[in-house]
């Protein structure tokens, strides 16, 4: 197992190297320059030339890339051109927000998706199955920003039940040592802060979780249908085991293997930042950060941010692979 | 199965309970806190140090914390006393004597006096190399230009406007210039030139830092992030990047104290999200209202709209390096061929007025007589083209930007298409050429690649030089003309210290520009701000910098 993990971690080096070259070339192929983006109407050709020179953008590409590689090798991811703050610091500020939102969305998707998929399979062909099929189709096909706007309009604007933006009440003055607001509230034992953080999470988590919910429900349904006719399930039933025990120990546990793959992949995706959801709910995470950086041609943020995201994505996938072994001991043997 | 049903029932009950609890706490979102105003902004500030920024979102809080020698009369561009009570230029216009307000303290208790003023001017003039970058100290570069120790390529002593600052006694300073300029007084009202506490600048190392491999300046101190200290009615309490910036009332303010105890600036990048946050009461105001949202706000009884006085110009630019646009008859034909009134009436949601000259109406130098008028007249346009010896239709390459909405052109494509149709009726044959605003469009226009193009400008400060001299004061690639008599008229107007004579010179320049037609101005628009109905005392400023100290909650 240890060898497997180490091998996967070593694989990270060529992946990141390749990615850094791709990202580096891609952003330089985009037309325009940071100076143009920064100053708009006030950017004169002389000024653009001066800024290009100061940011070393007038040097040959290989020279720029080598300079970039040597600085990140020293752990320096540079400074944002538009905010003048360290890229690593900004990532540290924003990543917890994305983690909190992604986890909440996945909890919503799993908590609803697995029971829904399981029940749909058990009632295969019935009205519940049909309704859940239509529901999942809707979940996958409704654009997230539209769902987000509708949810906000109903629950925030019309009913006033939930807030429409941000991570906590704007008037609150609470310390956030971990920047995970729910965790911070739990550590402090502050019930009001906990409820405030959860209240702000509900709408964005529901909007963001709608696609994973639909996928998890469909995959669970298919897996349960597949497994429940296997020999060992029939044997278990023939032995006279209680249906609940057959379902939980034999059907669900085996059906969860493909579901866990999907959950892992979806979590990895959500952790890369959900630009639309974060924008609609003004959620200060990685998605809005990278979007603004691309818009502003903020090269250090795009380069550094994407590398961080790639590391997170690869690590989450590694965790998923490791978790197979826990769920299904047969993988450990093989 | 019974257990399964129980589980479903329990989940449903939990959901209902959740909604019930959130309904019970609904007061949290629809609130009205009488001592705090939450204002939605489009982005975070960069840094709270005036001379080092040029973006509006940084200048907004800086404007509440810092004050300059002169300010603007609320709602206008008229220069009025602020930290200086009076001023006088000598006969040559090279020395300006400022009498300072007495008994003023910086927020850290440091006294404000002549030494503090010169400390600030010396700081700007002595900026180290990285801070001389135009992208960093844009307004010092634009207004004064020179540095004591210039980095490569920058103007040195004597090569810009600034010469020196000398304290005379405790409450008088003399600012010396290298050439006469009257626009610098208006420029001093810029938030960028606010006075900062010398003690804090040193203690919190405002100018210390290093430059990385990308050439970006890393500030080592905390002046601009945690300890921005000026003399203004509000002081910084906290700034959580990406979340909020909190200002609290300065209890020792020398003037009328701020009416509200706290102002919170909440960055919300999405326009629709800002509107919904206003509707829910999470914020009490925001600016940069999307014209498409204006009807929604007008229909909502709990909200109201305010307008900033028009301080911008939307124009059709002409590059005279392209023939036949070097011929003034062709440019006049173009002016007659643009149906400016119908564009302004159709696409500005009632917030635009047709421009007959480049300067906004509120600005000194706006000409009230002698301005040539170019009403939409296709027959006249065709006649002028024939007079110029051209065969009709005359081809025009007409550029407009995409992916952008500016106060002076909410929807450039609509403007371009309408102008194209009216030009096609007037003896021209329009070929459209579009490009994304950032970064292709602006760089193409500035590099002189566009023959005829849509563009505009929003003023930085209340001086005609910020409009006319910047655009037409020297030869440039954008408009491709060389008109020495116009250049010298604008230089003369900028240097004239007598305000009346200066106004007359700018009026003359305004008329000359409309005769020469380097551009065809077509609109001045009034950007909208949205507020909760009970927010009072907010006075919109033409230069977009409003004091929050006068704002309060009415009934």
Image (cartoon, grey):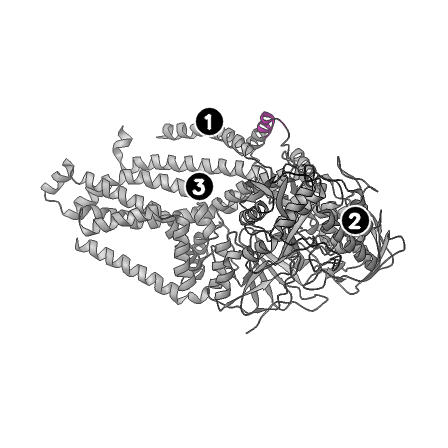
| Nearest to the observer: residue B480 or residue A47 | B480
Quarter-of-image position of residue B59: bottom right
Neighbour tally class for label 2: few under 14, some 14-19, many 20 plus, Cα within 10 Å:
many
Foreground tag (1 vs 3): 3
Vertical comparison of B4 with A301: above or below: below
User: Dots 2 and 3: beta carbons under 8 Å?
Assistant: no
The mark tally for this picture is 3
Quarter-of-image position of residue A29: top right
Query: Is label 2 in a helix, a strand or a loop?
Result: helix
Same chain for mark 1 and mark 3? The answer is: yes
* Distance from the alpha carbon under mark 2 to that under mark 1: 61 Å
Q: Residue B29 in the image: x percent, y percent?
A: 46, 64
In the image, the segment drawn in magenta is: A59-67
* Distance from the alpha carbon under mark 1 to that under mark 3: 20 Å
Neighbour tally class for label 3: few under 14, some 14-19, many 20 plus, Cα within 10 Å:
many
| Nearest to the observer: residue B129 or residue A139 | A139
Which residue, given by chain and number where applicable, does mark 2 sit on? B490
User: Dots 1 and 3: beta carbons under 8 Å?
Assistant: no
Query: Is label 1 in a helix, a strand or a loop?
Result: helix
Which residue, given by chain and number where applicable, does mark 3 sit on? A272
Which residue, given by chain and number where applicable, does mark 1 sit on? A14
Does residue B250 appear in this view? yes
Does residue A81 appear in this view? no
Q: Residue at image x 39%, y 67%?
A: B24
């Amino acid at each position: 197992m240890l060898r497997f993990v180490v091998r996967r971690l070593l694989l990270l080096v060529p992946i990141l190297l390749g990615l850094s070259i791709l990202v580096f070339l891609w952003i330089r192929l985009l037309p325009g320059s940071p100076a143009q983006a920064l100053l708009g109407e006030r950017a004169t050709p002389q000024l653009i030339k001066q800024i290009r020179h100061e940011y070393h953008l007038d040097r040959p590409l290989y020279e720029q890339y080598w300079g970039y590689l040597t600085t990140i090798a020293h752990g320096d991811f540079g400074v944002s051109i538009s905010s003048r703050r360290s890229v690593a610091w900004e990532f540290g500020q924003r990543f917890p927000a994305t983690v909190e939102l992604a986890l909440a969305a996945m909890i919503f998707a799993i908590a609803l998706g697995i029971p829904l998929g399981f029940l749909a399979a058990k009632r295969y062909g019935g009205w519940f199955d049909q309704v859940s099929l239509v529901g999942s189709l809707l979940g996958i096909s409704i654009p997230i920003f539209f769902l987000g706007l509708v949810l906000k309009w109903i629950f925030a604007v019309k009913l006033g039940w939930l807030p429409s933006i941000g991570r906590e009440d704007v008037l609150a003055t609470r310390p956030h040592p971990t920047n995970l607001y729910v965790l911070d509230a739990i550590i402090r034992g502050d019930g009001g802060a906990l409820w405030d953080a959860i209240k702000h999470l509900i709408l964005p988590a529901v909007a963001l979780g709608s696609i994973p919910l639909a996928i998890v429900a469909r995959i669970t349904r298919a897996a349960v249908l597949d497994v429940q006719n296997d020999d060992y399930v029939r044997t278990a039933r023939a032995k006279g085991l209680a249906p609940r025990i057959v379902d939980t120990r034999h059907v669900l546990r085996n059906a969860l293997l493909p579901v866990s793959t999907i959950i892992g992949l979806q979590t990895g995706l959500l952790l890369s930042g959900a630009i639309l959801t974060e924008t609609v709910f003004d959620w200060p995470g990685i998605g809005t950060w990278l979007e603004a950086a691309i818009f502003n041609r903020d090269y250090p943020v795009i380069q550094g941010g994407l590398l961080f995201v790639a590391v997170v994505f690869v690590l989450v996938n590694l965790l998923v692979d490791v978790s197979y072994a826990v769920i299904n001991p047969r993988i450990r043997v093989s | 199965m019974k257990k399964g049903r129980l589980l479903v029932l329990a989940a449903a009950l939990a959901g209902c309970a959740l909604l019930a609890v959130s309904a019970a706490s609904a007061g949290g979102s629809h609130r009205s806190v009488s001592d705090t105003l939450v204002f939605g902004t489009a982005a975070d500030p960069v840094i709270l140090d005036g001379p080092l920024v040029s973006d509006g979102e940084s200048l907004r809080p800086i404007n509440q914390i810092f004050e300059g020698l002169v300010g603007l009369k609320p709602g206008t561009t008229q220069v009025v006393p602020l930290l200086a009570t009076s001023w006088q230029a000598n006969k040559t216009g090279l020395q300006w004597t400022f009498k300072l307000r007495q008994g003023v303290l910086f927020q850290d208790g440091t006294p404000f006096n002549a030494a503090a003023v010169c400390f600030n001017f010396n700081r700007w003039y002595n900026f180290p190399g990285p801070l001389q970058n135009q992208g960093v100290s844009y307004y010092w570069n634009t207004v004064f230009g020179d540095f004591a120790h210039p980095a490569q390529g920058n103007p040195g002593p004597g090569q810009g406007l600034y010469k020196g600052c000398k304290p005379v006694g405790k409450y008088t300073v003399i600012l010396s210039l290298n050439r006469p300029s009257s626009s610098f007084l208006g420029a001093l009202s810029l938030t960028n030139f606010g006075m900062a506490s010398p003690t804090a600048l040193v203690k919190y190392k405002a100018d210390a830092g290093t430059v990385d491999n990308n050439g970006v300046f890393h500030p080592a101190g905390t002046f601009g992030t945690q300890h921005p200290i000026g003399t203004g009615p509000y002081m910084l309490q906290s700034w959580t990047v990406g979340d909020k910036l909190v200002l609290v009332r300065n209890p020792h303010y020398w003037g009328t104290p701020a009416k509200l105890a706290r102002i919170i600036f909440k960055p919300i990048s999405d326009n629709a999200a800002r509107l919904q946050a206003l509707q829910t009461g999470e914020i009490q105001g925001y600016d940069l209202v999307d014209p498409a949202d204006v009807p929604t706000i007008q229909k909502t009884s709990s909200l109201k709209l305010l307008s900033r006085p028009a301080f911008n110009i939307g124009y059709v630019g002409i590059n005279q390096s392209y023939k036949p646009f070097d011929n003034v008859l062709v440019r006049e034909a173009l002016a007659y061929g643009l149906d400016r009134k119908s564009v302004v009436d159709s696409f500005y949601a009632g917030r635009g007025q047709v421009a007959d000259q480049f300067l906004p109406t509120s600005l000194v130098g706006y000409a009230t007589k002698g301005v040539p008028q170019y009403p939409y007249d296709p027959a006249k346009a065709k006649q002028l083209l024939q007079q110029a010896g051209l065969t009709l239709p005359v081809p025009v390459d007409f550029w407009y930007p995409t992916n952008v909405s500016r106060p002076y052109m909410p929807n450039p494509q609509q403007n371009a298409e309408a102008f194209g149709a009216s030009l096609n009726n007037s003896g021209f044959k329009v070929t459209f050429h579009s490009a994304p605003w950032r970064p292709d469009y602006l760089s193409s226009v500035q590099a002189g690649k566009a023959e005829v193009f849509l563009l505009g400008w929003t003023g930085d400060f209340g001086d005609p030089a910020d409009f006319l001299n910047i655009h037409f004061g020297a030869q440039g690639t954008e408009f491709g003309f060389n008109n020495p008599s116009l250049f010298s008229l604008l230089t003369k107007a900028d240097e004239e210290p007598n305000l009346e004579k200066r106004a007359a010179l700018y009026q003359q320049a305004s008329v000359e520009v409309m005769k020469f037609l380097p551009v065809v101005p077509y609109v001045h628009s009034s950007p909208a701000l949205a507020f909760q109905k009970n927010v009072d005392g907010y006075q919109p400023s033409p230069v977009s910098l409003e004091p929050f100290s006068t704002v309060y909650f009415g009934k």
